[in-house]
Amino acid sequence: MKWKSIISEAWRNTITGTSKTILWLSIFTLLMTIGSLAEVAHTHTITTAAEEYVRAGGSISVIQSPENIDGAACEALNALPQVRAAGAIKTQESRITLTVLPSAPIPQALVSPTFPKVVSAQTSGLPGIIVSDQVRSQLPMKIGDSFPTVGGEVMISGTYDYPEDGRASGYGYMALIPTASETTYDQCWVDIWPQSPQVQGLLTSVVKNSRRDERSQTTMEQLNSRLGARFDGQARFQTRNTRFLVWIVGALSLCAGIIALRTRRLEFASALHAGAQRQDIRRIIACETLMWLLPAVAFTECVSVCVIASLGALSDTALYVLVHRIVWSSCVCCVIGLCIGWIFTREKHLFTYFKVR
């Protein structure tokens, strides 16, 4: 038979058996869609937890050694893999006194050039100080404006947010003054993500003096330990409840494929008995399968993209990979099931099929 005749016959069979077509379309659509959305929802939960962990400062380690932190060495940590930002800080005893609010002087600290990046500060790149949102809330000014102090005019070159969410206290109401990295500091803050024990072991290199009596004052802490000392996203992903869905959907699709063909074995055996060629029937089955399998794939893809968009995760390629794993597992196993069913469908079994129909 020519392909035109094969497609025509497949279309006629599909229209004639509308109820069966709708049945198998519904089954595979449900398998693919439910499996894909479950994977998307569970994986996005892990991603959201990771983002919250980083946003809360859980990935920031603080090495403290008063007057003993090498600013240049701390800044050099930025070159290490997995270090998102590193910078040093040194609090000052003197404070910035506003002429309009002399009763509430602002604590200040010297910071190395990259420290503002550690606290996700929004800066203009101009000379000046970087104030916390708590300070800016008392000053009706924006970045680039100047305000009067007892020591003269000071420009706001940036702002940073430091909420009270469990992170170390004392930095929510403060002004940061960027200085040269060669200065000696009290602390070195390092944002490591993903967290790495290897990188963590290199952090003590920022301590200048290695004498035992002075190194005994060196401590290493987590900026915010509220969400745990470590966030092992890989372990959470590998042990997620939906990790077996790709196999479950595949197994169900395999069974559905076998059943879909075995329910028509009498029809195919009769066609073979009437003189039809096996290869022509195979092609007709392939065309019929595509007519209900492709719409199921298209529906699953559309629904998955819409759900991913609603979660604000269109840029997360991992979610698309998980969706396609489910879709391709279902499609491949369906085809394998059809092939298994076809292999065991024989003309010589026609009367047996007829008796057990």
Image (tube, rainbow, N blue to C red):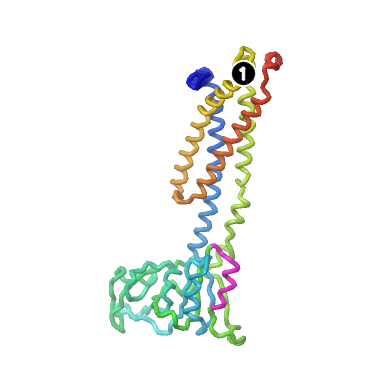
Residue sticking out furthest to the front: 2
Q: Is residue 115 above or below residue 270?
A: below
Q: Nearer the viewer, residue 120 or 21?
A: 21
Amino acid carrying label 1: it is Phe
Quick check: 321 left or right of 306?
Answer: right
Q: Nearer the viewer, residue 44 or 350?
A: 350
Q: Residue at x 55, y 70 (%)?
A: 222
Q: Is residue 19 above or below residue 38?
A: above
Q: Nearer the viewer, residue 203 or 52?
A: 203
- In percent of width and height, residue 319 lies at 51, 47
- At mark 1, the secondary structure is helix
Q: Is residue 327 above or below residue 84?
A: above
Q: Residue at x 50, y 81 (%)?
A: 70
Q: Which residues are magenta?
A: 194-205
Q: Residue at x 68, y 24 (%)?
A: 344
Q: Is residue 93 magenta?
A: no
**Would you call the spot at circle 1 few (<14 residues within 10 Å), some (14-19), or many (20 or more)?**
many
Instruction: Name the residue tied to disc 1.
Output: 268
- In percent of width and height, residue 105 lies at 37, 79
Residue sticking out furthest to the top: 274
Q: Residue at x 37, y 78 (%)?
A: 104
Q: Is residue 15 above or below residue 333?
A: above
Q: Quadrant of residue 155?
A: bottom left
